[in-house]
Image: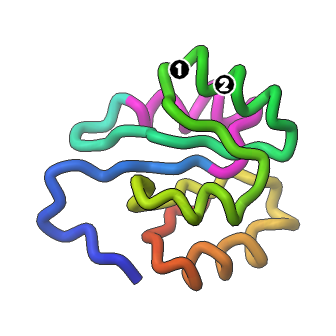
Amino acid sequence: MASLRGASEVRWGIIGCGDVCEKKSGPALMRAPRSRVVAVMRRDLAKAEDFARRHGIGRAYDAVDALLADADVDAVYLATPPGSRVEIALQVAAAGKALYVE
């Protein structure tokens, strides 16, 4: 697992940028000191790209593996429905990324 200790900034990837992320957790994460959201993922690429465009986020993906392969993502905020979280959390851990689960 990647260590973020001493990092000047945490570069986040969000998996599951839907309604909850839009209204609650996403804005807070984007405003947190020393945090920057650099990528988002949603199964519907058009919706992921729309979210990214509206929030000034550089990259959008439609596959978990693609976001996890992004070297600029230090940590992942997992905001998917509960039924999919365990499987995705295990993928994030296997990729060596830090993880925050909603």
Q: Which residue is mark 2?
A: 51
Disc tally is: 2
Q: Residue at x 40, y 53 (%)?
A: 72
**Magenta stretch: dominant secondary structure:** helix
Please rate how many residues cluster around mark 1, counting C-alpha atoms within 10 Å: few if below 14, some from 14 to 19, many from 20. some
Q: Secondary structure at mark 1?
A: helix
Along the viewing direction, whichever of 83 and 47 lies nearer the viewer? 47
Secondary structure beneath dot 2 equals: helix
Residue wearing tag 1: 55
**Residue 5 x/y as whole percent:** 18, 70
Residue furthest top in the image: 54
- Where residue 32 appears, x then y in whole percent? 31, 37
Front-most of 54 and 81? Answer: 54
Alpha-carbon span between mark 2 and mark 1: 6 Å
Which contiguous range is marked in magenta? Answer: 15-30
Quadrant in the rendering for residue 37: top left
57 over 5 or under it: above or below: above
Work out whether residue 71 or residue 64 is closer to the camera in this orientation and state it. 71
Q: Is residue 68 left or right of residue 4?
A: right
Badges 2 and 1: C-beta atoms under 8 Å apart?
Answer: yes
Percent x, y for residue 42? 77, 43
In percent of width and height, residue 28 lies at 44, 33
Residue 39 versus residue 83: which sits nearer the camera? 39
Q: Is residue 68 magenta?
A: no
Residue type of the residue flagged with mark 2 = Phe
